[in-house]
């Protein structure tokens, strides 16, 4: 069977030793669609590593303006090709074409690339810091090694291995990228890689700046993650997959930037429920079922007071869950994993109120609401924090704020934590106590809104304590902070001005913001200020 080519060393090539092939599937029907794509062998992975390693120094020395030009041109190419990209992504993921892909995700993808370009132009990600008295100057700089990016299944555009935030961040830091496409959307990834390849060529970047492999077996992925020629890896996916890659990377000293599982606890306080319980139920159900629940910020655990207003909220949520159609999941594997997670939660004491089973045609699952009391949760806090990746949430009923605080104290690290309080201030004291308990356990603390939205902003933290990510200082969204994941901190001690990077020299003709002797400014440094 003919298979599609790989993007290696600046050219589209047939795989050297394919270990098999696969086709995408339409999740709505379960039927195979599109052409066959190769499952790579060791020779293809080695070729990508060798080419990227050879290109790393040249890319690190490339003028930032050329990198920014590539990112902007690629963003424009994505916008210009929106109709094709949306059609491909819709066919391979069943995500809504207009409301999700065309209006939200594709514009987000190109905006991320443009924000990365701006961070390159203004040197914001490098954070130039100068101490004239000590004769020290430092900044963030390229790794001089390639970055392997492992893309997820749930964002075929905005987190795609060859277009998303990890990709943009690694390129902005002037590191070659070896993109591992997700097998759930190979045609979408191929089209993005074609646009990226064209932009690389037009920008005059090293040919191996962007390479893409479609799939390979687990052992080969671990071998790649554990290759010391890598400067870092970026991963978005399951905890099991992320921790396996991290173990391999750790053994070789390769930094692993991981975004993994999160249940994103939501605490509903009594005053909020008394004031607007019906509206909160509607907001919760919309958040939990959006995208068939396949968001890393899905509200997977909701803490509800065990009183009359709490009962009314649960009843309203149950009715809406019953009325919602089965959600289409990305693949058979996602569906089967979700079924296992729901059954495991029930095995540890949760009761299924609504749903709990798969449906046809294709890979559908009924919106599912589970419930357990706080005492039951506290008996098995680890097991009942299992992520159920889909339109599923676990309600935990609490008798008072102290019980909610005890629950908060047993939570693992999460991307988000949400508090809903009354507008008249009656919940303020309880919210303050819960906020203090949640703050070290979540990356983003949210008030009075569901966690599913993730704004593309320099102030955004899309990260959190382990096991939501591999490092509490990590964010996968927000330039320039996301770029620094794939950078090295370089320090210069009494080095002559002519040998310094441009942003650390005495003269600052570009008006770069620099921290000089403890103060931010854009001024030049007087010659001779450095001892």
Image (cartoon, helix red, strand yellow):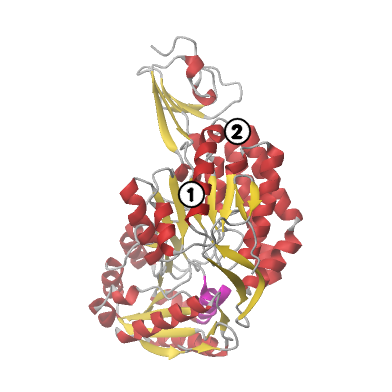
Residue at image x 54%, y 53%? 179
Disc assigned to residue 46: 1
Which quadrant does the C terminus fall into? top left
**Which residue is at the front of the view, 519 or 182?**
182
| Relative to 132, residue 513 above or below | below
The answer to whether residue 97 is left or right of residue 472 is: right
Give the left or right position of residue 362, taking residue 528 as reference.
right
Q: Position of residue 477 (x, y in %)?
A: 52, 53
Residue 134 in the figure: left or right of residue 422: left
Measuring 67% from the left and 36% from the top, which residue is drawn there?
Answer: 204
What kind of element bears circle 2?
helix
Q: Is residue 293 magenta?
A: yes
Using residue 414 as the reference point, say whether residue 318 is left or right of it. Answer: right
Tag of residue 64:
2
Predominant secondary structure, magenta span: helix
Rendered location of residue 268, percent (x, y): 41, 74
In three-dimensional space, the C-alpha distance between marks 1 and 2, rounded to whole angstroms, equals: 28 Å
Measuring from the top left, give residue 203's x and y in whole percent.
69, 38
Q: Is residue 144 visible?
A: yes
């Amino acid at each position: 069977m003919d298979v599609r080519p790989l993007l290696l060393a600046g050219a589209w090539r047939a795989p050297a030793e394919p270990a098999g092939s696969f086709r995408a599937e339409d999740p709505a029907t379960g039927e195979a669609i599109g052409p066959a794509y190769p499952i790579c062998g060791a020779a293809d992975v080695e070729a990508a590593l060798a080419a990227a390693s050879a290109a790393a120094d040249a890319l690190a020395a490339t003028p930032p303006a050329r990198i920014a030009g590539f990112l902007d041109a690629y963003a424009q190419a994505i916008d210009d090709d929106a109709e094709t990209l949306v059609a491909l992504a819709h066919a391979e993921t069943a995500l809504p074409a207009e409301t999700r892909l065309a209006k939200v995700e594709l514009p987000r993808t190109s905006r991320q690339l443009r924000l990365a370009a701006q961070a390159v132009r203004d040197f914001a990600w490098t954070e130039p810091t100068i101490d004239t008295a000590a004769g020290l100057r430092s900044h963030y700089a390229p790794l001089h090694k390639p970055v392997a990016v492992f893309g997820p299944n749930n964002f075929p555009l905005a987190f795609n291995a060859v277009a998303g935030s990890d990709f943009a961040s690694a390129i902005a830091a002037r590191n070659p990228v070896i993109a591992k496409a997700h097998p759930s959307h190979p045609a979408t990834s191929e089209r993005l890689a074609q646009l990226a390849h064209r932009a690389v060529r037009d920008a005059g970047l090293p040919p191996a700046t962007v390479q893409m492999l479609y799939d390979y077996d687990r052992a080969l992925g671990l071998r790649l993650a554990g290759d010391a020629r890598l400067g870092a890896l970026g991963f978005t996916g399951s905890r099991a997959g992320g921790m396996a890659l991290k173990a391999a990377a750790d053994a070789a000293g390769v930094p692993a930037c991981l975004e993994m599982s999160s249940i994103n606890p939501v605490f509903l306080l009594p005053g909020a429920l008394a004031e607007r319980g019906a509206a909160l139920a509607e907001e919760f159900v919309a958040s939990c079922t959006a995208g068939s629940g396949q968001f890393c910020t899905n509200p997977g655990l909701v803490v509800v007071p065990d009183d009359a207003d709490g009962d009314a909220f649960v009843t309203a949520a149950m009715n809406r869950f019953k009325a919602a159609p089965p959600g289409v999941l990305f693949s058979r594997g996602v569906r089967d994993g979700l079924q296992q997670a729901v059954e495991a939660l029930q095995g540890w004491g949760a009761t299924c109120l609504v749903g709990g089973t798969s449906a046809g045609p294709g890979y559908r699952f009924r919106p599912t609401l589970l419930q357990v009391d706080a005492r039951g949760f506290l008996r098995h806090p680890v097991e009942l924090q299992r992520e159920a990746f889909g339109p599923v949430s676990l309600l935990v009923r609490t008798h008072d704020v102290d019980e909610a605080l005890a629950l908060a104290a047993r939570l693992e690290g999460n991307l988000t934590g949400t508090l809903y309080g009354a507008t008249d201030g009656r919940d303020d004291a309880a919210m303050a106590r819960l906020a203090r308990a949640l703050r070290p356990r979540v990356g983003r603390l949210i008030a009075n809104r569901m966690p599913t939205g993730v704004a593309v902003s320099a102030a955004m933290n899309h990260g959190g304590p382990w096991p939501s990510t591999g490092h509490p200082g990590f964010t996968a969204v927000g330039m320039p902070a996301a770029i620094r994941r794939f950078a090295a901190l370089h320090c210069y001690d009494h080095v002559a001005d002519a040998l310094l990077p441009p942003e650390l020299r005495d003269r600052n003709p570009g008006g770069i913001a620099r921290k000089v002797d403890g103060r931010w400014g854009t001024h030049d440094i007087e010659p001779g200020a450095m001892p």
